[in-house]
Amino acid sequence: MLLEPLVRARHSVSMYARDTASIATPIGTVTVLGTADWITAVTIGPVDAAPSASDSPAVDEALRQLAAYFDGTLTHFDLPLAPSPTARGGTLREAIVAIGYGETATYGTLARAIGSSPRAIGQACARNPFPILVPCHRVLGAGGVLGAYSAGEGPHTKSRLLDLERHQGVLL
C-alpha cells in the first residue's frame, strides 16, 4: 500500500515535536503532553511516578501553573490548549472553563446556560483531554451528587480536587 508510508509521515511524532513532562501533586503524578506551542493532553497517574522535565515552553508553563494551582496561588489557568476538534466541543469546553475556582455547577445547570443537554456536558467531561485545566471536577450531578470523573482514580480524584479548592478558598 503506497498510501500507508505517506499517512505515517504526515502524522509522525517528530513532525510535531511532542514533549512530555510531569510533576508530583497531592492527587498523583500529573503529566502534561504537548508541543512547543500547544498543550495536547494532561493525565493523572500514580503518586510513585517520577517527575520529569520538558524542553517545550508550553509544557513548562503548564507545569509551572499546575504547581501554583496546587500551592493555592493560582485559581485560573492561562495556557494554549490544543483546539477542540469541533466547534460544539469548543463551546462545551468554554462553558466548563467558565466555572470559577472553588465553585461547582450541575450538568443540567451548565447545559441550560449554553442551550445544550446534560448528556452532552457529561460526554464532554468524559472525553476531556485536559483534566484540572478544563475543570470537569467542578461539574456535579443533580442535587450536588459527585458523579463520575474520567481522570486519575475517578470520583476519588474529583473529590480531592474539590476539597483542595474549598480549603484553599477558605485560606485566601
Image: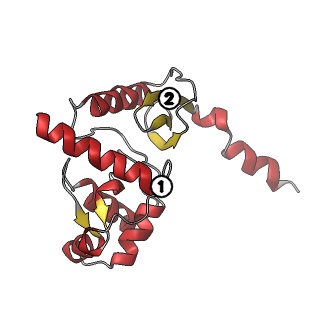
Asked if residue 146 is positioned above or below residue 111 in the image, the reply reads above
Disc 2 vs disc 1: Cβ atoms closer than 8 Å? Answer: no
For the point 21% across and 55% down, which residue is it? 98
Q: How many marks?
A: 2
Callout 2 crowding tier (Cα within 10 Å): few <14, some 14–19, many ≥20: many
Q: Amino acid at mark 2?
A: Ser
Residue 46 image-quadrant placement: top right
Give the distance between the C-alpha atoms of the residues marked 2 and 1, in whole angstroms: 19 Å
Callout 1 crowding tier (Cα within 10 Å): few <14, some 14–19, many ≥20: some
Residue nearest the observer in this picture, 158 or 77: 158
Asked if residue 126 is positioned above or below residue 39 in the image, the reply reads below
Q: Earlier in the sequence, mark 2 or mark 1?
A: 2
Residue 116 image-quadrant placement: bottom left
Location of the C terminus by quadrant is top left
Give the number of the mark in front: 2 or 1. 1
> Farthest residue in the right direction?
1
Residue nearest the observer in this picture, 53 or 10: 53
- Percent of width and height locating residue 144: 25, 68
For the point 51% across and 20% down, which residue is it? 53
- Percent of width and height locating residue 132: 36, 45
Judging by the rendered image, the residue that carries numbered circle 1 is: 154
For the point 28% across and 46% down, which residue is it? 163
